[in-house]
Each structure stands twice: as structure tokens, then as C-alpha cells.
């Protein structure tokens, strides 16, 4: 088919959006130093706004070229289930009862690990970067990202740690969450896009991908803890239970049921949005057991992902032929690279449309897509949630995309070697 002007425009706007993410910190800096248009610079410096902004430009372009009806029709053809799901799961997973039970689980495991010659800050750091990302295979990656980022923020990022440790931790977190969700076929967005079509069940995922991901996650977490052991050992980790009121067991159970219901019906927005409305009513009725809900953070993340969906819908014309022309080894490394500049779920979805793709190519595509999921904010759907939660603890309340990319190279390399060699 002949490529249309709208498809060309979509590719150009997508490239501009990717470039914009790398310039976001500069725009945010201008918002603090410029006396004019500080509000505009602040808006342009919000990473979560980037893809939504350029998606709006694309929709206006379609309306100008083909008419408003065509623009509306294009939007209605897109699937916004994932942005809605990430919004709901982020808000539920970030509530006090869910964090309460997650902290108890981590605390228990840390106590078990104290038989090893590890200080408490090192042990807690190690568990936060390994157990929680792997838990994403069961509670979904967005929920795991939310829990891990909130717990790391509370115990480390607010503890005046160095910028070097902040970026290294973020790089490992994003990579480990991306690969930590492959033990099951429903938790990682890039796996979810192809599992049904290719017949990948939980047995296949755990035996082909899962154990390799576990090794990579542990190596990355242990490596980061060892490299920064001196700085971590000097930290005074606040006791999570010191000023925390007791949480009734029934409150935790109800929240876990809401979380489980959202996960089970993650493909049915009519159901999980309905559950979420019930959840909002429940939290309002028991406000004494709640902190402020993360509605703003969730909406910003959903806006980012929705913009990515709108822009990504115009990339099929060049991505699909590119994927089809690669052998399995080239496809693996190509997927890692392409994931850094586009959403890995969109990448695997386009790969699933290639007819006659071999089993080796299927493995290479998905393994490469999850391996590269921590290199940029746009590489994996849960990444904007981690950005939103942690960015205020960085200098000028902004995370440098280049800093993240450099920090994620080493854990990405470890993951790549595990998927290639084992």
C-alpha cells in the first residue's frame, strides 16, 4: 500500500516526541530560570505530557487533512484499555493497605536474609529490586512498579542518597520490572500482546522465559547492591512500622480483592472501571485507613500512554516490514533498540502480524522487547508510573532521559546475556 501523508506525519511527530522526552529536563530547567513563559516551559518539561501533546498535534493534522470525522474515527479505532488499566492499577496498588501488606512481606524476607552478612539497608534494597519486580508476574508489572517505586522512594530516595545511586537504582528497577513479568503470559504488556495468538501459556512462559528472567533480575539486584554497598550501609532506614497505625485485616483483604479483580478483568475496561468506582466509594467510606489517592499521578501516566497509543497507530507502515526483514539474532538486538524508541507492547503486536514468523524469531522478538524495556520512559508501559513517583526526588524534580539510558545499559546487557546464553 502507498504510504499516506498522514503516516509520514505520524512518523515525524513520533520522532519529535521521542526527541522531546530527551529535552524534557531542559524545558523543566527553563521553567525555574526563565522569567517569561515559565508555565509553558513547565508543561513542556512534564515527561508524562510529551506524547499526549504530540498526539494532539497528530489528531489536529488528520482533522486538517482529512476532516474532523476522520480524526474522530481514527481515535475510536485505537485501543485505550492499557492506559485505563495502568491508571486503575496504579491508584489501587498505591493505597495504604496494599503498601502495608507489601512492606510486611518485604520486612519478613529481609529478616530471613539477615542470616547473611548484610546490613539492613543493603538487604532491604536487594529485596526491593528483586522480589517486587518478580511479583509483577502475578500482580502485573504496573502494580509491581508502583509498589517498588513507592517503597524505594520512602526508604532511599528521600534519604539524601547520591544522584548516581538514584539513577542506577532507577535503571535496575525499570529493567527488572520489564523482564520480571515474563513468568506468566498476562502480566507483561509485550507478552500479553502475543501470548494468545501464539499459544504461550504459563508453563511455556516459565520454562522458556521465566527462569532466565529470574537469574537476570537477581544478578542485577545483587550487582547494584554490591556496587553501592558502602553508601547503602551508611543509611539510616526509617522504620516503616514506627508511626504507622495498625491496619485491620479486613481492610487489607478488601483491597487485595479489588486488586485481584482488576488484574483478572484487565482486558475488560467496562468491568475494571466499574470495580474502580466501587473502590473509590469504599475508600471514601473508610478514609481513616487511607492516604491521598494517587489520582493525579495515575491520570498523567494514563495520558502519556494514551498519547503513545495514538502516535503508535501510525508507525505500522515502517515497523512491520523492518521486523519482517530480520533473522532471529538481528531481530533480538533490533527489538532491544526499537523498544528504546517505541513501546515494547506495540513492537511485539506488530511482530505478531508478520505471517509465517518462526519460533526462533518469536522468542527473539519478545526477549529483545522485554530486555530493552528499561532504557527509556517510553520503552515499557509501567515506566511512566515509576517516573511519576520518583521524579520529585531528583535534582530540579526531573529525571534526565540520558541519565536513565546510561544507567540502564549495564542491567540491560545482563538481561540480554541471560536470554541469549541460557
Image (cartoon, rainbow, N blue to C red):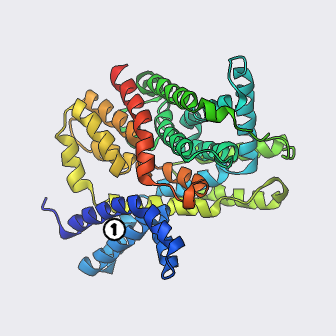
Residue 206 higher or lower than 403, as above or below: above
Instruction: Check the picture and name the quadrant holding the C terminus.
Output: top left
Q: Residue at (30%, 40%) from the top-left corner?
A: 335
Q: Residue at (24%, 78%) from the top-left corner?
A: 65
Instruction: Check the picture and name the quadrant holding the N terminus.
Output: bottom left
Residue ID for mark 1:
74
Q: Nearer the viewer, residue 230 or 159?
A: 230
| Position of residue 326 measured from the top left corner of the image (x, y, whole percent) | 19, 37
Q: Residues within 10 Å of mark 1 (few under 14, many from 20)?
A: some
| Position of residue 70 measured from the top left corner of the image (x, y, whole percent) | 30, 74
Q: Quadrant of residue 282?
A: bottom right
Q: Quadrant of residue 51?
A: bottom left
Residue 116 higher or lower than 186, as above or below: above
| Position of residue 172 measured from the top left corner of the image (x, y, whole percent) | 50, 38
Q: Residue at (84%, 46%) from the top-left corner?
A: 244
Q: Residue at (72%, 21%) from the top-left corner?
A: 114
Q: Quadrant of residue 372?
A: top left
Q: Determine whether, in the image, residue 158 is placed left or right of residue 304.
A: right
Q: Nearer the viewer, residue 317 or 118?
A: 118
Residue 397 higher or lower than 68, as above or below: above
Amino acid at each position: 500500500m502507498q504510504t499516506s501523508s498522514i503516516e509520514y506525519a505520524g512518523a515525524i511527530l513520533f520522532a519529535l516526541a521521542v526527541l522531546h522526552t530527551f529535552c524534557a529536563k531542559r524545558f523543566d530547567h527553563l521553567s525555574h530560570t526563565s522569567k517569561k513563559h515559565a508555565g509553558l516551559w513547565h508543561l513542556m518539561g512534564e515527561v508524562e505530557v510529551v506524547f499526549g501533546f504530540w498526539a494532539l498535534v497528530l489528531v489536529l493534522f488528520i482533522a486538517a487533512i482529512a476532516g474532523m470525522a476522520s480524526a474522530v474515527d481514527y481515535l475510536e479505532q485505537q485501543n485505550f484499555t492499557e492506559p485505563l488499566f495502568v491508571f486503575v492499577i496504579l491508584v489501587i496498588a498505591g493505597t495504604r493497605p496494599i503498601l502495608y501488606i507489601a512492606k510486611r512481606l518485604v520486612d519478613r524476607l529481609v529478616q530471613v536474609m539477615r542470616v547473611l552478612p548484610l546490613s539492613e539497608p543493603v538487604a532491604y534494597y536487594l529485596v526491593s529490586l528483586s522480589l517486587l519486580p518478580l511479583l509483577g508476574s502475578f500482580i502485573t508489572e504496573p502494580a509491581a512498579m508502583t509498589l517498588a517505586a513507592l517503597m524505594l522512594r520512602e526508604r532511599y530516595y528521600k534519604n539524601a542518597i547520591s544522584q548516581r545511586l538514584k539513577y542506577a537504582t532507577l535503571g535496575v528497577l525499570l529493567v527488572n520490572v520489564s523482564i520480571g513479568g515474563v513468568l506468566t503470559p498476562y502480566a507483561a504488556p509485550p507478552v500479553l500482546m502475543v501470548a494468545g495468538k501464539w499459544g504461550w501459556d504459563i508453563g511455556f512462559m516459565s520454562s522458556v522465559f521465566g527462569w532466565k528472567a529470574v537469574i537476570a533480575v537477581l544478578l542485577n539486584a545483587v550487582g547494584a547492591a554490591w556496587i553501592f554497598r558502602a553508601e547503602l550501609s551508611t543509611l539510616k532506614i526509617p522504620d516503616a512500622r514506627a508511626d504507622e497505625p495498625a491496619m485491620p485485616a479486613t481492610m487489607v483483604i478488601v483491597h487485595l480483592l479489588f486488586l485481584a479483580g482488576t488484574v483478572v478483568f484487565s482486558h475488560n475496561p467496562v468491568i475494571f472501571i466499574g470495580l474502580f468506582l466501587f473502590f473509590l466509594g469504599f475508600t471514601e467510606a473508610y478514609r481513616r485507613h487511607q492516604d491521598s489517592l494517587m489520582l493525579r499521578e495515575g491520570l498523567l501516566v494514563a495520558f502519556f500512554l494514551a498519547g503513545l497509543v495514538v502516535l503508535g497507530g501510525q508507525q505500522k507502515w515502517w515497523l512491520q516490514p523492518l521486523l519482517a526483514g530480520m533473522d532471529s539474532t538481528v531481530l533480538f538486538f533490533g527489538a532491544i533498540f526499537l523498544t528504546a524508541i517505541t513501546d515494547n507492547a506495540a513492537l511485539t503486536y506488530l511482530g505478531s502480524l508478520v505471517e509465517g514468523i518462526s519460533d526462533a524469531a518469536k522468542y527473539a522478538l519478545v526477549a529483545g522487547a522485554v530486555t530493552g524495556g528499561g532504557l527509556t520512559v517510553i520503552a515499557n508501559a509501567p515506566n511512566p508510573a515509576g517516573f511519576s513517583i520518583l521524579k520529585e526526588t531528583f535534582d530540579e524534580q526531573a529525571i534526565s532521559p540520558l541519565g536513565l539510558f546510561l544507567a540502564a545499559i549495564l542491567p540491560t546487557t545482563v538481561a540480554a546475556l541471560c536470554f541469549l546464553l541460557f
